Amino acid sequence: MTAVPLRRNRDFVLLQSGQLLSSAGTQSTAIAYPLLVLAVTHSPARAGVVSFARMVPLALLALPAGLAADRFGRKRLMILADGVRVLAIGSLALAVATHHLAYWEIPLVAFVEGAGAALFSAAQAGALRAVVPGPQLPAVVGAQSGRQAVVGLAGPPLGGVLFGVARVLPFVVDAASYAFSTLSLAAMRTPFEEEREPDVGPVGARLVEGFRFLWSHPFLRTCALLFGVGNFIGPGVLLAVVVIGKRQGLSGAEVGLLLAAFGACLLVGALISPLVRRALSPRAILLLELWVSVGSAAFLVRPSVYVLTAGILPAAVAIPSTDSVVHGYRIAMTPDRLIGRAESARTMISLLIAPLGPLTAGVLLGAVSPRSTIAVFTVASLALAVWGTVSPSIRQAPRLDDL
């Protein structure tokens, strides 16, 4: 494939524009779901059930979704995933608009939306590699990090505003965003997979093949484990920011601004990612994120939520550059017939560990002091940084030129 500027790559622009709108819709309903449950039931516990129902399919269905992405046409699967989500969110919007909404419909729709996200994500990596040449993949992953940062900043406030205008509005917008994504996929011309023979081996063997590929490459294996544990630490520290901020007298809006600062630094990191990749080696980029993540140690010296937030902001700036190197290299080197399963294996590692971070933070904050809680996560961050520094596979990190 001839490398043309990404802005002139028609199919890439279609893929990314569809994902930008659908991600914005998804982020807007991330706050609209709990607001709707609270309005209907006045129960925080039931709001938690809906959030869980939306997230759990991403872990439960990761492996079968990856298997489907490597077996069937990826474009059809992505359109199917979007179409199902249009119908599910549309039915919820109709029930809200006609005042015939029962609580059980909300977690059911949330589960269906999460299942669609699992199927879509498993096929998306192969679609991305089909429309983007290997050397441009790090830049593309960096751009995706920027997109996620933007929608992460704008989506929840937008959802809150729309819900305030009318309860049905954020769900109508979300359904419309999935419809737009469907149309953008249908307009793409590039095949989403190479020619391949049907794999008729046992299902169990096909499921573990993605894990086997990931595990057989020391660099990919080490990164999956390092950043899988990192996904445990990051959400735990962010929850600690919320809880500690409230304990120190901050309002909900002020706590929200602290979290928005983290999102803003992610966006800055995405914007400077091309410069970082030109200036530093892949190993230096990886170690940079690992070592700046130890910045939470500043809270141990001065236990202020502002100090804690300032301590983790450098990690937010570093994350997009690391993602662009690791994810870009992994997508580029994975055989087309395995990319769905390999990506699903990596996703499953991340999602199985990530929910334990906030759980651990919540338990520790209820049992010991905030300083002791942050000390636990800081020690874990330090251990990761030392591990990455001495790891032979990180020391021998591949050059981006290998793409």
Image: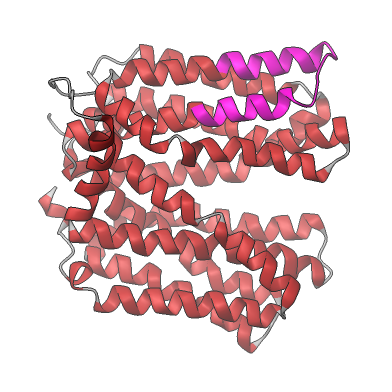
Q: Is the magenta stretch mostly helix, strand or loop?
A: helix
Q: Looking at the picture, does residue 68 appear above or below residue 345?
A: above
Residue 60, percent from left and from top: 48, 38
Q: Looking at the picture, does residue 106 appear above or below residue 73?
A: below
State yes or no: residue 258 in magenta. no
Residue 272, percent from left and from top: 38, 56
Q: Specify the segment rendered in magenta.
A: 86-115
> Residue at the spot x=73%, y=60% of the render?
255
Residue 118, percent from left and from top: 45, 32
Q: How is the image coloured?
A: secondary structure
> Residue at the spot x=17%, y=24% of the render?
199
> Residue at the spot x=41%, y=58% of the render?
228
Left or right, 263 with respect to 214, comes to right
Left or right, 69 with respect to 309, comes to left
> Residue at the spot x=57%, y=33% of the render?
24
Q: Quadrant of the N terminus?
A: top left
Q: Evaluate whether residue 232 shows in this view.
A: yes
Left or right, 36 with respect to 344, comes to right
* Residue 368 vs residue 205, the one in the foreground: 205
Q: Evaluate whether residue 25 shows in this view.
A: no
Hey, which quadrant is residue 202 in on the image?
Answer: top left
State yes or no: residue 108 in magenta. yes
Q: How many marks?
A: 0
Q: Looking at the picture, does residue 193 appear above or below residue 369?
A: above
Residue 126, percent from left and from top: 27, 31
